[in-house]
Image (cartoon, rainbow, N blue to C red):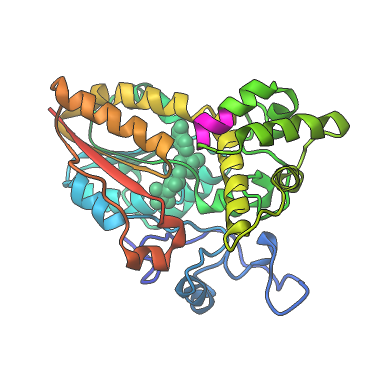
């Protein structure tokens, strides 16, 4: 098997984007996603990419996997076992899980994203794992039971779900996930299905918008923001990330005090999160996944879930506790596992991560 790319890419598999000629950009550093051609090619530009990571940044087109050591510790994958990565993303966790179940084991990797999935599969295959050991399928994890059945797998020994978004999705302006980059207000994990965020904002009634902001993101200014959206869309549709952020900024005003800008950014971030959860029915998928998990785990099988906000963590915690009470799970995480200061310094995107685990009875 080919060596994985050495540190600092322990959990970053090689990118497949072909070498490009120098992209022209103004200033000394590229600012736009597409201009960051060095970051898209971490093997050729290893030194530049290392420096970016040392500054606590995630290079464009990559994702830095979170709590990898801790995930492996709680899942304890063994040679010969069947592992599932329900949220393949960039493949960092998958790479480690697959390595641990070999020889003899297999990894079934799922993701809903039809754009990133083939890139990740190509990178993983380039690492020359036995081809039959890696099964990559585009599927919502709510369909895990069917995905296992389609591969004639009676159940899994190890299941990981690392919820939310990958950095490649967040940083790509075309996907519309971040208010920090201008792009269409899309927010779909699978842009080939459903309606983009802009279409939801055009049609949701005010009360439903308030509910989404409150239930999906605990946004304290939900009423003001929802009213502002309804007012703004009477004049013009809200089609871009920048337009949505501007509506929120105008509605809440500049604020006052030393944390005014931070608080305003938090409200914008939460509003994007609320809309994204709605667009992708993320809580519906997570609830379905939590319900079907026990049936997908072999006796003694382990599951680990990384969540990134309270709406997700509440659901995971409740499902695991209920399962422990009724005997479905033999053991569940007594407490949350969080990234330490070293990891959050190196990768600030890890700071909100919460890891919980359970063992099937
Ligand atoms: C945080 S990333 C995973 C990163 C990955 N663990 C790694 O090491 O690169 C989350 C991934 O989950 C995917 N995802 C989110 N909801 C999903 C769902 N309901 N079913 C399947 N995949 C989902 C996203 O498309 C994204 O690629």
Residue 17 coordinates in the image, percent (x, y): 58, 59
Query: In the visual, does 63 lie left or right of 199?
Result: left
Q: Nearer the viewer, residue 18 or 194?
A: 194
| 257 part of magenta stretch | no
Residue 156 coordinates in the image, percent (x, y): 24, 32
Q: In terms of image quarters, where does ligand 1 lie?
A: top left
Quarter holding the C terminus?
top left
Query: In the visual, does 284 lie left or right of 219?
Result: left
Query: In the visual, does 227 lie left or right of 323?
Result: right
Q: How many marks?
A: 0
The image quadrant that residue 204 belongs to is top right
Quarter holding the N terminus?
bottom left
Residue 132 coordinates in the image, percent (x, y): 32, 41
The segment highlighted magenta reads 212-217
Q: Is residue 6 above or below residue 338?
A: below
Q: Is residue 196 above or below residue 76?
A: above
Residue 111 in view: no
Identified at 42% across, 61% down, the residue is 12
| 216 part of magenta stretch | yes
Residue 343 in view: yes
Magenta span dominant secondary structure: helix
Query: In the visual, does 186 lie left or right of 321?
Result: right
Identified at 51% across, 32% down, the residue is 216
Q: Nearer the viewer, residue 264 or 236?
A: 264
Residue 286 coordinates in the image, percent (x, y): 41, 29
């Amino acid at each position: 098997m080919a060596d994985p790319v050495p540190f600092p890419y322990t959990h970053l598999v090689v990118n497949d984007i072909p070498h490009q000629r120098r992209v022209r950009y103004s200033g000394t550093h590229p600012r736009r996603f597409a201009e960051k051609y060095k970051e898209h090619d971490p093997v050729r530009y290893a030194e530049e990419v290392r420096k970016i990571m040392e500054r606590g940044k995630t290079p464009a087109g990559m994702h830095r996997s979170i709590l990898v050591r801790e995930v492996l510790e709680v899942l304890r994958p063994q040679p010969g076992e069947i592992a599932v990565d329900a949220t393949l993303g960039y493949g960092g966790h998958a790479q480690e899980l697959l390595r641990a179940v070999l020889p003899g084991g297999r990894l079934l990797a799922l993701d809903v994203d039809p754009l990133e999935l083939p890139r990740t599969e190509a990178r993983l295959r380039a690492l020359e794992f036995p081809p039959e050991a890696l099964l990559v399928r585009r599927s919502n994890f709510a369909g895990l039971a069917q995905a296992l059945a389609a591969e004639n797998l009676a159940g899994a020994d190890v299941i990981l779900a690392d919820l939310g978004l990958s950095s490649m999705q967040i940083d790509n302006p075309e996907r519309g996930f971040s208010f920090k980059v201008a792009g269409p207000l899309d927010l779909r994990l699978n842009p080939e299905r459903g309606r983009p965020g802009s279409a939801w904002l055009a049609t949701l009634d005010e009360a439903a918008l308030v509910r989404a902001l409150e239930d999906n993101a605990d946004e304290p200014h939900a009423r003001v923001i929802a009213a502002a959206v309804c007012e703004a869309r009477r004049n013009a549709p809200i089609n871009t990330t920048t337009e949505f952020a501007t509506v929120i900024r105008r509605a809440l005003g500049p604020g006052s005090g030393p944390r005014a800008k931070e608080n305003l950014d938090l409200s914008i971030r939460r509003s994007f999160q609320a809309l994204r959860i709605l667009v992708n029915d993320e809580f519906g998928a997570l609830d379905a996944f939590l319900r079907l998990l026990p049936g997908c785990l072999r006796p003694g099988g382990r599951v680990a879930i990384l969540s990134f906000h309270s709406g997700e963590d509440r659901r995971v915690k409740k499902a695991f506790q209920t399962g422990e009470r009724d005997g479905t799970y033999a053991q569940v995480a007594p407490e949350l596992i969080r990234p330490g200061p070293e990891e959050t310094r190196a990768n600030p995107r890890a700071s909100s991560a919460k890891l919980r685990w359970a063992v099937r009875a």
